[in-house]
Image (spheres, grey):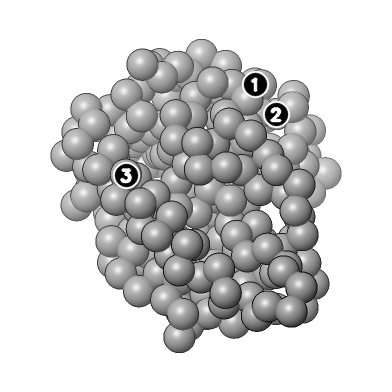
Amino acid sequence: MNLQQIKGQYDVIVSLGFACNTAMKLRDHNLRKFSGPIDWMVSESLSDVSRLLKNRFKGFMELENMRLLHGHGSGHGLDNGTDLQPSINHVIKDTFYNIVSYHDFPVIPNQDWTATYPAFKNKTQYRIERFMGKITNSQSVLFVRWGGSYEQAIELHSILSRIVKGTFNILILVPVEGHQGVSDLNWILNQVCAVRVPNLVYDDATWNYVLHGITVV
């Protein structure tokens, strides 16, 4: 598919990462109705995201697989996905799926990062159930992802074909250092549109061009 073919109206549009930029830009264009389980996390590998979907999020962010990394994150979207609240947070990695949380574990004096884990787990489970319900039962779904290869797109499409009951398309923005503008990659994959874009994750011009003509019910 090319970019023009993917334009249109969808019942649900969701982010599949790579980081907060995808969810934020969907929100800025009024295309995002809820927070997904990985919207505010970093998922560098699309293969790991596909494995997460294949497993229906089984084992995701389980305490025994989570590790504290050096450094801190700041700011986070609330559960309704409409606001950003300033905060300083621990950086925590799920070592099973290689997905990193920068915004869910606030630094609290004299408390370990695990002190807020129960609340985080409840929130995450709620988001998982809502996400799976939406993509499983909606008549038309658009999945948007920053970063991914042709082979990874094949893998993702195969997995989503077993989950989504309605129709769906996948839009992948492939960042290329030094590239100007937006151009179709013309991958020969049904239901998959991949476009080459500048390696600028928050570039308004890129997102405005890519998302123009895409709407949600």
What residue type is disc 2 on? Answer: Thr
Callout 1: SS: helix
- Dot 2: element: helix
* Whole-percent x, y for residue 94 in the image: 52, 74
User: Contact, CB < 8 Å: mark 1 with mark 2?
Assistant: yes
Q: CA distance from mark 1 to mark 2?
A: 5 Å
Label whose residue precedes the other's in the sequence (3 or 2): 3
Nearest the camera: 69 or 13?
69
Residue 2 or 170: which is nearer the viewer?
A: 170
Residue at 53% across, 79% down: 66
x 74%, y 27%: residue: 204
Which dot marks residue 209?
A: 1
Q: Residue furthest right?
A: 178
Horizontal arrangement in the rendering, residue 78 relative to residue 107 (left or right): left
Q: Which residue is mark 2?
A: 206
Q: Which residue is mark 3?
A: 130
Nearest-to-viewer mark from 3 and 2 = 3
Q: Is residue 53 left or right of residue 19?
A: left
**Contact check, label 1 and label 3, Cβ < 8 Å:** no
217 is higher (above) or lower (below) than 13: above
